[in-house]
Amino acid sequence: MVGRKRSEVFVKKWLKIFCLDAFEEDKIAKELLNMPFSEERDLPLLKFLFLNLPKILDKRRSEYVWNLANAYAFFCLNFWQARTTFIAFPETYAELLKDALTEKEDIYSPKIRAIVEILADTLPDGQCGFNSFKFKNIKPIREAQDIVFKGRYEDFLSDVGRAKYEEFEQKILDSEEFKRDWKLIKQLYPEETKVDGKLRRKLLNERGWTQDEGVSFNSPQSEFEAIFELFCWKYYLWAMDGDKPYIMKPSVNITPLGTQIFIPSYISYDAKRDFNHGKISRLHKAKGTQKQGVAFTESRTRLAKLKELAKKAETEGRKNNLKGDKLLDYIANTIGRPNMDFRSIRKLIER
């Protein structure tokens, strides 16, 4: 960064990562408005990132503050790309780091230090440990987030899978038993069932066991919730909207830690025909997941060893004052690949 302001380097770097030519507030505000799950605090956080934070970097010239600023930017990138695919409420992390950058928080407090140092090794391409802040292909992620927002999970189903869901949905709608049970609940709990919009049951746990106290009958509200849980279990529901049932759909969700496929028990699952596996595969690969298997592992192991040899040869060559093509030719011969083209050699030694 010698000869250049830290602010210039920082802004140029993050405009590129955000795929922006410049920070234009009106355009940014419009794009945020069109994003599912966007929040009011998103725009102020982005304004601070591109307009205020660079000035702070020119004043507070330390590696720690630089890392803190980059950590802040990565959390902003979270909600800019697709909020549902990262740690919940990334803007809360960003706000905490903003307070540290503006000296409202102790910059060296345990919580700030932990965040900064955990993210300090994040690479420019977003690779953070074994996970990544940045997607290789954002389009399927944005599409999936829109599907989640609109509840159109059937978009991931094939025609066969969609027909199975629609058949079960019609069975519920035609069921006199279902209508009788719902009428009973409304009679017994008139106040609890009078809600605006959807009446939702509890969210499913990440795994099959319950770690809290579960249902209880200690109050009228908890009593109703327990009864409603049972009712939803009986008919595979996640909500009621007036008298309209919302049935659990076969669904695909990309989460902070992976791609989750949910198959309701009423579906007679056919692995080859029920889902649009091409669409699911594109979604799962969007983060840049490497191909795996014995052959791929062996290939990557060989490549890693070759890179190590190439970098050692580069160091030796530079000690002997070799440069340009002579250096590349020396590396190729040293690693036992005399016929390897120079472009491939450069890839082996690139940092």
Image (tube, rainbow, N blue to C red):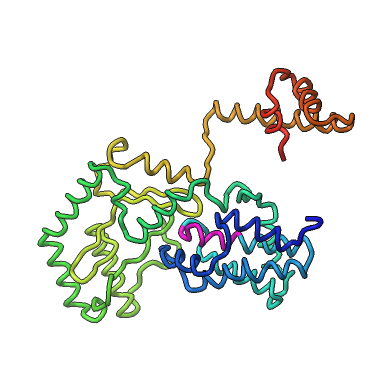
Give whichever of 215, 91 is nearer the camera. Answer: 91
Q: Quadrant of residue 232?
A: bottom left
Q: Is residue 304 left or right of residue 147?
A: right
Q: Nearer the viewer, residue 80 or 5?
A: 5
Our reading of the magenta stretch's main secondary structure is helix
Please state if 266 lies on the left or on the right of 68 as rendered. Answer: left
Magenta range is: 74-84
Where residue 163 sits in the image (x, y, percent)?
20, 46
Image quarter hosting the N terminus: bottom right
Q: Is residue 22 magenta?
A: no
Up-down relation of residue 198 to residue 331 (above or below)? below
Give the side of residue 143 with respect to residue 15, left or right. left
Count the labels in the image: 0
Name the spot of residue 28 as percent of width and height, x first. Answer: 50, 65
Residue 300, above or below 57: above
Residue at the image position 42 percent from the left and 42 percent from the top: 282
